[in-house]
Image: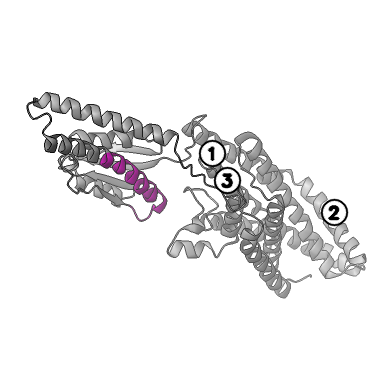
């Protein structure tokens, strides 16, 4: 019990010092709120009040067909809100623009597309994708499959009706205009019936998670990445403050006086860590609360898992602060190192939302490097809980990794830290 009382006493002293540092508190709370509000408002304006879109995918379109079905595909693409479609005259120009990263993909409609569909001949629509933008390329490919399927169905129905009329010979004496009118009329009737069946299908497919809840999407899902990413980035700004606090107390002799009192070294370090753990938890509570209240950010279905993940994140931050305090020579050096680490690790760890999903889910070298940071595992855990309604068990790997990192930082700090 004495160790607990000593730890709480040290923590309370540290909290009082933190409260007096108004400038740092402004950075920890007001700055992320300002940045989050700006980015959130911009995305809401882009999406519109009732839209589900968070990010536009830039797509280039080369329509070499210029006939009925080619124009139909082009018009369908331009009406899809998720795509920002730009007409390009040649395939070579589109390839160059995709190669430089100015578009996620380019859609090439071949010259004989309408003729092939009309005669029930196989045809290909080429999609050139940027491998550096896998999410956008996947979106374009999925949409194109749906659009082309619609056109193919229309073409098959037209071909079937034309073949039936020709083979039966019922309208052998009818003129070409009459045949085209009948073909169009029958095609329209069949497509209208199909559309009605889609509106009221015999079998309704509903996407649900493992808990039986319907899954969501759109801009609220993107906010489940944007705001946790900003929060994770700014909670690591307390690392420099924690390290500088330790060095200041060592240099001023406060640590020596504490050691002269009946307080153990573990209680001293534990109390300081507890203060910064509470600070991080308060940051997360405030920032998530504002994001949920004003921007509709989902909070998921497992509050206990959110709390556990936040505590694990806070322990990593506090442990890294102690590590910085053990390695840095001066308080200024500790503060500067903490600030630099906060920015660098945020970029590497995917805390800055530059894509639709966390960077930790990307493939290749960058995906591996990202997972070496605590930021990536914290953001992945929050995204899984909020956007995908993951449960307690699903985020245990992220929690375990964060706790392991915190333990590693603490062991190194204990080995290197000098109390005098």
Q: Secondary structure at mark 3?
A: helix
Task: Provide residue 266's location: percent of width, then percent of height.
Answer: 82, 69
Residue 340 covered by magenta stretch: no
Q: Which residue is mark 3?
A: 224
- Residue at 9% of width from left, 25% of height from top? 174
Q: What is the distance, in whole Å, between disc 3 and disc 2 at their CAs?
A: 33 Å
Label 3 environment density (alpha carbons within 10 Å; few <14, some 14–19, many ≥20): many
Residue 368, percent across and down?
A: 49, 65
> Does 249 appear above or below 155?
below
Instruction: Specify whether 308 is left or right of 379.
Output: right
**160 left or right of 231?**
left
Using a 10 Å C-alpha cutoff, classify the residue at mark 1 as few (fewer than 14 neighbours), some (14 to 19) or many (20 or more).
Answer: few
- 90 horizontally vs 7: left or right: left
* Location of residue 89 by image quarter: top left
The reply to whether discs 2 and 1 touch (Cβ–Cβ < 8 Å) is: no
| Residue in view at x 35 percent, y 56 percent | 131
Q: Secondary structure under badge 2?
A: helix
Q: Given this view, does label 3 or label 2 mark the residue nearer the observer? A: 3
Q: Which residues are magenta?
A: 130-153
> Residue 39, labelled with which disc?
1
Which label's residue is closer to the chain start, 1 or 3? 1
Q: Quadrant of residue 66?
A: top left
Q: Which numbered dot is residue 12?
A: 2
- Magenta span: helix, strand or loop, mainly? helix
């Amino acid at each position: 019990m004495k160790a607990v009382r000593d730890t709480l006493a040290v923590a309370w002293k540290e909290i009082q010092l933190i409260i007096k540092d108004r400038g740092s508190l402004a950075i920890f709370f007001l700055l992320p709120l300002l940045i989050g509000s700006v980015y959130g408002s911009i995305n809401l304006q882009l999406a519109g009040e009732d839209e589900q879109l968070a990010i536009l995918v830039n797509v280039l379109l080369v329509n070499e067909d210029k006939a009925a079905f080619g124009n139909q595909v082009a018009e369908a693409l331009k009406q899809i809100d998720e795509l920002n479609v730009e007409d390009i005259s040649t395939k070579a120009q589109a390839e160059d623009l995709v190669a430089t990263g100015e578009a996620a993909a380019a859609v090439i409609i071949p010259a004989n597309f309408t003729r092939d569909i009309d005669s029930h001949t196989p045809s290909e629509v080429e999609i050139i994708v940027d491998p550096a933008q896998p999410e956008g390329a996947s979106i374009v490919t999925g949409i194109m499959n749906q659009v082309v399927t619609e056109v193919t169905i229309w073409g098959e129905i037209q071909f079937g009706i034309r073949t039936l009329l020709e083979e039966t010979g019922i309208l052998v004496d009818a003129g070409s205009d009459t045949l085209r009118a009948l073909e169009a009329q029958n095609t329209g009737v069949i497509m209208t019936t199909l559309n009605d069946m889609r509106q009221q299908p015999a079998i309704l497919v509903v996407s649900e998670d493992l808990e039986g809840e319907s899954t969501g999407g759109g801009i609220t899902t993107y906010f489940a990445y944007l705001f946790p990413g900003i929060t994770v980035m700014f909670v690591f700004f307390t690392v420099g403050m924690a390290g500088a606090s330790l060095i200041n107390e060592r240099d001023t002799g406060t640590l020596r006086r504490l050691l002269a009192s009946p307080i153990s070294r573990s209680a001293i370090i534990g109390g300081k860590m507890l203060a910064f753990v509470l600070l991080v938890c308060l940051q997360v509570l405030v920032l998530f609360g504002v994001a949920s209240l004003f921007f509709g950010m989902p909070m998921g279905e497992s509050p206990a898992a959110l709390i556990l993940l936040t505590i694990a994140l806070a322990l990593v931050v506090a442990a890294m602060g102690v590590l910085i305090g053990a390695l840095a020579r001066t308080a200024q050096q500790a503060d500067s190192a903490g600030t630099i680490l906060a920015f660098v690790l945020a970029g590497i760890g995917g805390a800055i939302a530059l894509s639709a999903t966390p960077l930790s889910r990307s493939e290749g070298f960058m995906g591996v490097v990202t997972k070496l940071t605590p930021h990536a595992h914290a953001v992945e855990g929050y995204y899984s809980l909020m956007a995908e309604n993951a449960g307690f068990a699903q985020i245990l790997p992220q929690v375990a990794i964060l706790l392991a990192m915190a333990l590693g930082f603490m062991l190194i700090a204990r080995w290197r830290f000098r109390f005098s």
